[in-house]
Image: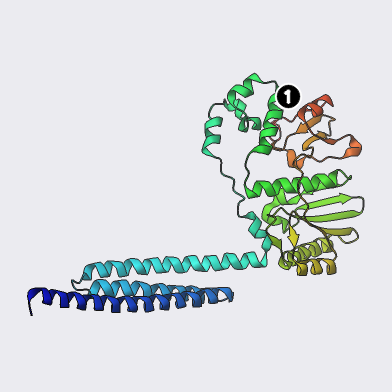
Amino acid sequence: MGYYEDVRAELQQTISEWHEVREQAQEYLEHIRDQKKDLEQIIKERQIGFPTLASAFEYYQQLQDQNLVDFLKYKHVPAVRASEVVANMARERRRAISDKKILEYLVAYYESVAPFLIDLKEEVDNISEEDRRILADYSEEELEDKVTNYVSKKEYRKLSTTERNQLALDRYWSRPKSKWQIGKMYERYVGYTYESKGYEVEYVGIFKGLEDLGRDIIASKENEIVVVQCKNWSKFKVIYEKHIFQFFGTVFQYRDANKGRSVKAVFATSTTLSDLAKRFAKELKIELKENFKMNKNYPCIKCNISNKRDKIYHLPFDQQYDKAKITPKRGEFYAKTVKEAEDAGFRRAYRWRGPAQA
């Protein structure tokens, strides 16, 4: 047999071995996919044994890491030192992954028990680089006016007070907002609808956050109290029965603490509820306001009269906006524009600096 015949035979043998290795790799890949499906099924079962699940993930990772270690240690030119380094690093990584998984399971469990926690994920609102650049142009005194968040230095100093306040309000509505900000605006709108009907409104969700227990708004009129939970969700999301159960629990607690008064429960949402959630709401006597959208054109300027009879208007970004209550019978109202508020004799609120020092 000549040289070329030998080379040809060797190539054929190599190709044959390559096909065999490829088939083994395909089988191994299918095995990995099956393992992944098994693990995903474990997660779906929502077992309470969080550490056990985390250990299962850790063991799974260990098997994969061991394959790499074995390859380095037993390959044609062994890399023993490298295999030891990989083994140590893999051990630390698995421990970190295990801890992370336990925390993820705990968070998911807490959110399933108390659904309102989901709405608080974006409560921290970070200022953008563009905002930092704009604010850097102002003096320290000017920065105390929240209008500077929405207008340039040139606009702030050139426009009249009425014009720049209105421009800031217009931009407040047009700027992109975080989910938390949108939720806050929705609560304000729902509160506005009750204040317009003569209710005294307390914005519990805005001020108390986690402590509100799902009671976003408490509206009072005479002997009646309306406890409202607000959910401004995407139209593609659905409210399920767990949210109704959680809300019923907090309303029950509130009724127990306010015996002798009529306490009504209202669930207001921009989206819809599942059929089962609707049935439970009906049985639990919770009034539903489905597809209750926020009207961004509603008059949002609060025209409030202080105890000293000072007529003050508050813009949505002003410090005391959510504390200012509107009582129509006292001559207080919501204005659509800054000019409307000022024409009625109201001035913009000053920044509150706390109690005067003696």
Query: x, y percentage for residue 295?
Result: 77, 44
Task: Count neighbours of disc 1 (C-alpha within 10 A) and say few if under 14, some if 14 to 19, many if 20 or more.
Answer: some
**259 and 123: which one is in front?**
123
The colour scheme is: rainbow
**150 and 88: which one is in front?**
150
Residue shown at 67%/62% (left/top)? 115
Helix, strand or loop at mark 1: helix
Apparent side of residue 2 relative to residue 200 in the rendered image (left or right):
left
On screen, residue 177 above or below 73? above
The residue at the far top in this view is 158
Query: x, y percentage for residue 317?
Result: 69, 37
**Residue 11 visible somewhere in the drawing:** yes
**Residue 353 visible somewhere in the drawing:** no
Apparent side of residue 347 relative to residue 99 in the rendered image (left or right):
right
User: In the rendered view of the protein, which quadrant contains the N terminus?
Assistant: bottom left
Query: x, y percentage for residue 253?
Result: 79, 63
User: In the rendered view of the protein, which quadrant contains the C terminus?
Assistant: top right
On screen, residue 232 above or below 195? below
The residue at the far left in this view is 2
Query: x, y percentage for residue 216?
Result: 75, 53
**317 and 280: which one is in front?**
280
- Residue tagged 1: 162
Residue shown at 81%/52% (left/top)? 218
Residue shown at 46%/73% (left/top)? 57
Residue shown at 86%/54% (left/top)? 225
The amino acid beneath tag 1 is Thr
Apparent side of residue 101 relative to residue 48 in the rendered image (left or right):
left
**251 and 44: which one is in front?**
44
